[in-house]
Amino acid sequence: IDFDWNEPMHKYYFWINLADMATTMYALENRDNLYEGNYIVNDRSPELEKLFLQKALVTYAFHEFGMFSGEEVTDDWLFLVNAGITIATINNYRLIVKYD
Protein backbone atom coordinates (compact mmCIF):
# COMPACT_ATOMS: atom_id res chain seq x y z
CA ILE A 1 0.00 0.00 0.00
CA ASP A 2 1.28 3.45 -0.86
CA PHE A 3 0.65 6.71 0.93
CA ASP A 4 -3.11 6.82 1.56
CA TRP A 5 -4.80 10.18 2.14
CA ASN A 6 -7.71 8.34 3.78
CA GLU A 7 -5.39 6.95 6.45
CA PRO A 8 -5.28 9.41 9.39
CA MET A 9 -1.64 8.74 10.31
CA HIS A 10 -0.54 9.24 6.70
CA LYS A 11 -2.46 12.48 6.46
CA TYR A 12 -1.06 13.63 9.82
CA TYR A 13 2.48 12.82 8.62
CA PHE A 14 2.01 15.18 5.67
CA TRP A 15 0.50 18.04 7.70
CA ILE A 16 2.92 17.85 10.63
CA ASN A 17 5.87 17.89 8.23
CA LEU A 18 4.39 20.96 6.55
CA ALA A 19 3.92 22.63 9.96
CA ASP A 20 7.51 21.74 10.89
CA MET A 21 8.85 23.34 7.71
CA ALA A 22 6.66 26.42 8.17
CA THR A 23 7.68 27.01 11.78
CA THR A 24 11.33 26.34 10.94
CA MET A 25 11.34 28.85 8.09
CA TYR A 26 9.46 31.43 10.13
CA ALA A 27 11.93 31.10 13.00
CA LEU A 28 14.97 31.33 10.72
CA GLU A 29 13.63 34.35 8.82
CA ASN A 30 12.30 36.28 11.83
CA ARG A 31 14.61 35.45 14.74
CA ASP A 32 18.28 36.34 14.43
CA ASN A 33 19.36 34.14 17.33
CA LEU A 34 17.76 30.87 16.10
CA TYR A 35 19.23 28.30 13.74
CA GLU A 36 18.33 24.93 12.23
CA GLY A 37 19.27 22.15 14.62
CA ASN A 38 18.59 19.19 12.30
CA TYR A 39 21.96 17.52 11.69
CA ILE A 40 20.66 15.91 8.47
CA VAL A 41 20.21 19.33 6.86
CA ASN A 42 23.70 20.34 8.09
CA ASP A 43 23.10 24.04 7.58
CA ARG A 44 22.40 26.61 10.30
CA SER A 45 20.07 28.59 8.02
CA PRO A 46 18.91 26.42 5.10
CA GLU A 47 16.75 27.65 2.27
CA LEU A 48 13.19 26.36 1.94
CA GLU A 49 14.20 24.22 -1.04
CA LYS A 50 16.82 22.39 1.04
CA LEU A 51 14.32 21.68 3.83
CA PHE A 52 11.76 20.48 1.28
CA LEU A 53 14.33 18.22 -0.41
CA GLN A 54 15.30 16.70 2.95
CA LYS A 55 11.64 16.02 3.81
CA ALA A 56 11.00 14.55 0.34
CA LEU A 57 14.04 12.25 0.50
CA VAL A 58 13.15 11.00 3.99
CA THR A 59 9.54 10.41 2.93
CA TYR A 60 10.71 8.53 -0.17
CA ALA A 61 12.98 6.34 1.97
CA PHE A 62 10.12 5.66 4.39
CA HIS A 63 7.94 4.69 1.43
CA GLU A 64 10.60 2.36 0.04
CA PHE A 65 11.00 0.69 3.46
CA GLY A 66 7.24 0.13 3.67
CA MET A 67 6.51 2.75 6.33
CA PHE A 68 3.11 3.46 4.74
CA SER A 69 2.17 -0.20 4.26
CA GLY A 70 -0.56 -0.20 6.89
CA GLU A 71 0.94 -3.16 8.76
CA GLU A 72 0.84 -2.96 12.55
CA VAL A 73 4.62 -2.75 13.01
CA THR A 74 4.97 0.06 10.44
CA ASP A 75 2.00 1.89 11.97
CA ASP A 76 3.85 1.81 15.31
CA TRP A 77 6.98 3.28 13.67
CA LEU A 78 4.94 5.90 11.83
CA PHE A 79 3.32 6.87 15.13
CA LEU A 80 6.77 7.39 16.66
CA VAL A 81 7.96 9.40 13.64
CA ASN A 82 4.83 11.58 13.81
CA ALA A 83 5.36 12.07 17.55
CA GLY A 84 8.98 13.13 17.01
CA ILE A 85 8.07 15.63 14.31
CA THR A 86 5.26 16.95 16.49
CA ILE A 87 7.71 17.54 19.34
CA ALA A 88 10.11 19.33 16.96
CA THR A 89 7.28 21.53 15.66
CA ILE A 90 6.10 22.41 19.17
CA ASN A 91 9.69 23.25 20.07
CA ASN A 92 9.96 25.50 17.01
CA TYR A 93 6.86 27.38 18.12
CA ARG A 94 8.15 27.56 21.71
CA LEU A 95 11.40 29.12 20.52
CA ILE A 96 9.58 31.57 18.25
CA VAL A 97 7.50 32.78 21.22
CA LYS A 98 10.45 32.75 23.62
CA TYR A 99 12.57 35.02 21.40
CA ASP A 100 9.74 37.30 20.33
Image (cartoon, rainbow, N blue to C red):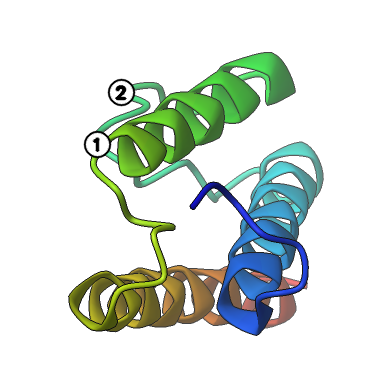
Residue 69 vs residue 99, the one in the foreground: 69
Q: Position of residue 91 (x, y in %)?
A: 51, 77
Q: Position of residue 19 (x, y in %)?
A: 73, 62
Residue 96 vs residue 80, the one in the foreground: 80
Tally of numbered discs: 2
- What's the mark number on residue 13? none
Mark 2–mark 1 Cα distance, whole angstroms, equals 5 Å
- Neighbor class of circle 1 (other Cα within 10 Å; few <14, some 14-19, many 20+) is few
Judged from the image, the secondary structure of the residue bearing numbered disc 1 is: loop
* Amino acid bearing label 2: Asn
Q: Position of residue 60 (x, y in %)?
A: 44, 30
Residue at the extreme left of the image, as rendered: 73
Residue 84 vs residue 32, the one in the foreground: 84
Quadrant showing the C terminus: bottom right
Note whether 4 is above or below 25 in the view shown: below
Contact flag, marks 2 and 1 (Cβ < 8 Å): yes
Measuring 60% from the left and 67% from the top, which residue is drawn there?
Answer: 10
Residue 51 lies in what quarter of the image? top right
Judged from the image, the secondary structure of the residue bearing numbered disc 2 is: loop
Measuring 24% from the left and 36% from the top, which residue is drawn there?
Answer: 39
In the image, taking residue 33 as reference, residue 80 lies left or right, namely left
Residue 38 lies in what quarter of the image? top left
Which residue is the site of mark 2? 42
* Amino acid bearing label 1: Tyr
Measuring 59% from the left and 51% from the top, which residue is drawn there?
Answer: 3
Which residue is the site of mark 1? 39
Q: Position of residue 31 (x, y in %)?
A: 71, 51
Residue at the extreme front of the image, as rendered: 1
- Neighbor class of circle 2 (other Cα within 10 Å; few <14, some 14-19, many 20+) is few
Note whether 2 is above or below 13 in the view shown: above
Measuring 63% from the left and 27% from the top, which residue is drawn there?
Answer: 52
Note whether 77 is above or below 37 in the view shown: below
